Image (spheres, rainbow, N blue to C red):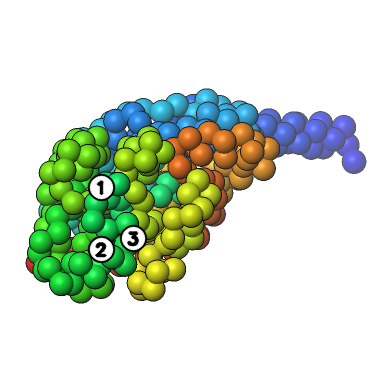
Amino acid sequence: MSFKWIAALGAAAMTSIAVSGAHAAGAFPDRPLQVVIPFQPGDTDNMLRPFLERMNEFLKQPVVLNYRPGAGGGIGAGSVATSAPDGYTLVGTSPGSIVVVPLANADIKYSPDDFAPVASLAEGGLMLVAPATSRWKTLTELVDYSKENPDKVTFTSSGAMGITHLLAEAFAHTVGVQWRHIPYKGSAPAITALLGGHVDMASTAIAPAQAHIQAGTLVPLAVFGETRLKAYPDVPTLKELGYDIGSPTYYGISAPAGTPPEIVNAIYDAAEKVVDKYGDDIAKNLAVFGAQIKLLNPQDYKAYLDDQRRLFSEAIKSLN
């Protein structure tokens, strides 16, 4: 082989290496990721921050929270639905923002199909609670009273057509009782109204009720999830009490639809490594809010969100 051919082959090899190196340098991620939190601080971010703040170790890039509240989560989630599907803009996902809001609000232009689920990270329970002074101390007593006194029992939630409202309506429809909904703008005023005797009970996230449960002024009747929560091992699930309904509330992250599977999997892998390395510490962080780790891969998280879509579609139809 002539010297010219050897030189040409060497140059071609160097070019190939340079191109390969340039491609590797551009591998995902090569800049910071942002996770849009579609609510005010104090709810979804509490569930996700223990994971997200540690993912930079494995992604080798910062993961930044960007708060965009409004429209029950619709503004922030909608902004991600129309973002570039490149993995750099994600949304903090909950059934409320991704499933319930577009089903219940015709003005919202996105649907669950506009997102690619990446990972479920935490389970934050929702429950039915009553004041300690209430005439009923168990859910069975409440249901029996409700059947004997149609439309007399009142309940509150964090807002009309939100997840806590619709779950209570779905339960009432399942067991054949009628409750009157008294909505408030947020969990805190709803709990205040309950403690003040303005309503009989509440469908609520655990965090806003937790201090009052611990103080003994509120009594948890049942959790909506399919398994008991570690923070409340003595509180039964609806299914344990014989009611054919269960709806765990998982918080996670999703990307815009069309995000390449290899990018979705890269982000999930980082989350999995976080749980493997820091799971004990994260569990302690979440326990403060009555929550626990719930890691699901992209496929299983999508299946969960699809189930939630069916449940809430039926709940909304029952109100019409």
Disc ID at residue 138: 3
In the image, 29: left or right of 244?
right
Q: Quadrant where the C terminus lies? A: bottom left
Q: Are marks 3 and 1 in contact (CB under 8 Å)?
A: no
How far is the residue under mark 3 from the one under mark 2?
7 Å
Of tags 1 and 2, which is closer to the observer?
1
In the image, 13: left or right of 236?
right
Q: Secondary structure at mark 3?
A: loop
Q: Secondary structure at mark 2?
A: helix
Q: For the point 50% across and 46% down, which residue is it?
A: 231
Q: For the point 76% across and 36% down, which residue is it?
A: 13
> Hey, what amino acid is under mark 2?
Leu
Question: Which of the two residues, 150 or 316, is positioned nearer the viewer here?
Answer: 150
Q: Residues within 10 Å of mark 3 (few under 14, many from 20)?
A: some
Q: Residues within 10 Å of mark 2 (few under 14, many from 20)?
A: some
Please identify the quarter of the rendering in which residue 66 is found: top left
Q: Which residue is mark 2?
A: 142
Q: For the point 45% across and 26% down, which residue is it?
A: 64
Q: For the point 20% across and 67% down, which residue is it?
A: 145
Q: Quadrant where the N terminus lies? A: top right
> Hey, what amino acid is under mark 3?
Thr
Q: Residues within 10 Å of mark 1 (few under 14, many from 20)?
A: few
Q: Which residue is mark 1?
A: 133
> Hey, what amino acid is under mark 1?
Thr
Question: Which of the two residues, 38 or 21, is positioned nearer the viewer here?
Answer: 38
The image shows residue 233 at horizontal and vertical percentages of: 51, 53
The image shows residue 90 at horizontal and vertical percentages of: 41, 39
How far is the residue under mark 1 from the one under mark 2?
13 Å
Q: Are marks 3 and 2 in contact (CB under 8 Å)?
A: yes
